[in-house]
Amino acid sequence: MDIFNMTALQIGQKIKNKEISSVEVIKYFFNNITNKSNGYITFTEDYAIKRAKKIQEKIDKKEDLSILAGVPISIKDNICTKGIRTTCASKMLKDFIPSYNATAFKKLEDAGAILVGKINMDEFAMGDTGRTSFFGGCNNPWDITKSTGGSSSGCASSIAYNEAILTLGSDTGGSIRQPSAFCSVTGIKPTYGLVSRYGLIAFAPQFDQIGPITKDALDCAKTLEIISGYDKNDNTTIKKEKFSFIDENFNIKGLKIGVCKNFIEYSDKDVQTEILKAVNILKNLGAIIEEINLDVIQYSMPTYQILSSAQSISNMARYDGIKYGYKPENIDCLEELTIKSRTDAFGVEVKKRIMFGNFVLKDDKNNYYKNAINAKNYITKQFKEAFEKYDILLAPTTPKTAASFDDNTETDIFLASSNLTGLPSISIPCGFTKNNMPVGMQLISNYLKDDIILNISIQFQKNTSFHLKRPNIK
Ligand code: GLN
C-alpha cells in the first residue's frame, strides 16, 4: 500500500477500517521519504512513531477520533510546534524551539493527525519563489528549472513530489495559492478570522491566514473543518466554535459565476486557454457564467506591498538577539548585539522589507500608507459590488505557469486582493499547457462563504482528473 499516492481521507479511512495501522503508515512514511523536493527542513521521526503508537491504542479502544487519526501531516515552518524546532526558514530562528503549539496545529493533533515534519518556505514567508529560504530552495517536479512559487514553497512542492500527504501553509498575499498553482495541488486561503493565527509567526497580521495545501479539495475542506473556529488566544477569530463545509448534495447548477475577464486577458495565452476550458466544464455542470471586469489589478500589489511591509516591521523588531533569535559571539555592548544579530541572520529579502516598511511609515510627503488604506477600501468596495451579483468569482490563480528564476513577473498579482479584503480564495489544478506545465484556477467567494468555493472545487474534481495527474520524477 503506497500511502504517498493516497489522500489524507483515504489513509484515514484505511486506518479506521483496520486495513493498516497508524504505526505502519508512519513507518512506511519514514522508510520511503526521499526529500527530493527539499520541502522539509526538519523530520520528526521519533516523535511521530511514539505518537502513532498512542493514537493506534486510542483507535483500538474505539475512542472518538476524527477521520484524520493516524494520518501523517506536515506543517510550514512558521507555525509553532511545541518542543520541535520552528525556523521560519531563517538563520535568525534556526535553533528556535517553541514552548507552545499553534492552535491550528494543536487542533489537528487533537484530531489524531501525526506530525512527520516541518516544511521549507521563503524566509519569514517573504517571497514568491521559495528561494529566500536559509535552507535552500525547493524543487518543482514539473520542471526543476522553474520556481515552485512561495512562500509555502515546500508545502506545494512536497505534495507534488508525492512526499507529503497533507500540509498546513500560510498566506499573506498569495503564499498558499500561488505555489499550489505552480505545483498542481489544491490550496485554500480561508476567510480572515476563520483559522486562529495563534502560534503563526507573524509577518503582516492583518492579512496572515493559515490554510491547508493538499492533494484534493475534499482533504482541504475536511482539514479546514478541523482547524477553523473561535480561539480565545486570537481576538480576530470569528466567534463561532465549529464550521462545516462539505455538502454531499451540493449542486453547481444555477450558481452565478463572474469570470474575471480582465484577469484572463492579462494572462499568458496558454493560461487563458486552460482557464476558458475549465469555465466551460463549470458551464456544462450547470453554472451560469457571466463576464466581469474588476478594476483592481493595478492597485492590489502596490497596496499589498506597502501595507504588508509596514506591518512587518514591528513583528521583525522582536528579533534583537536578546529575547529571540541568533546570538552572535564576541560582543561588547547591547547595540552591537542587536545590529550584528540582525545583520548576520536576516536574509536580503527580509532586510528589504524592513527598510521599505520603515520608509513608507516615515515618509510624510507622499502619504504612501494613507493612500494604500484608501486603495484597500476601494478594492473592498469592488468585491462587495461583485458579490451582490455573483456567488463566486473565477480567475487564473497566476498570469503564467511556474516562472523561471530570473523572471520578475508579479505572479501573485491576482491573489493579494483576497488578503486585503479578507475574502476566501482557493486554487485548484485546472489544466496543463502544451509544455505539460500546470495551470491553476482561482475561485473567490464572499466573506465566510468558504463552503461554496470548496464544494465547487470538490464537484469540479469529481468531474475532472487534473488534480490526479502526477509529474514524471526521475
Ligand atoms: N509573495 C508575497 C510576499 O512576498 C506573499 C507572501 C505571503 O503570502 N506570505 O509578500
Image (cartoon, rainbow, N blue to C red):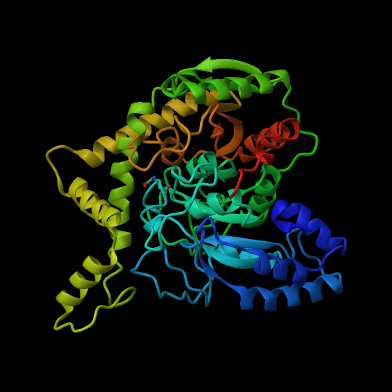
Q: Residue at x 61, y 67 (%)?
A: 116
Residue situated furthest top in the rendering: 290
Horizontally, is 382 left or right of 356 in the view?
right
Q: Quadrant of residue 335?
A: bottom left
Horizontally, is 415 left or right of 393 in the view?
left
Residue 339 horizontal/vertical position (percent): 18, 70
Query: Which quarter of the figure is the N terminus placed in?
Result: bottom right
Residue situated furthest front in the rendering: 474
Q: Quadrant of residue 8?
A: bottom right
Residue 49 horizontal/vertical position (percent): 68, 76
Say which of 40 and 312 sits in front.
40
Horizontally, is 124 left or right of 447 in the view?
left
Above or below 366: residue 242? below
Q: Residue at x 21, y 66 (%)?
A: 343
Numbered marks: total: 0
Say which of 121 and 469 sits in front.
469
Asked if residue 226 can be seen in this view, the reply is yes
Say which of 70 and 319 sits in front.
70
Residue 223 horizontal/vertical position (percent): 66, 53
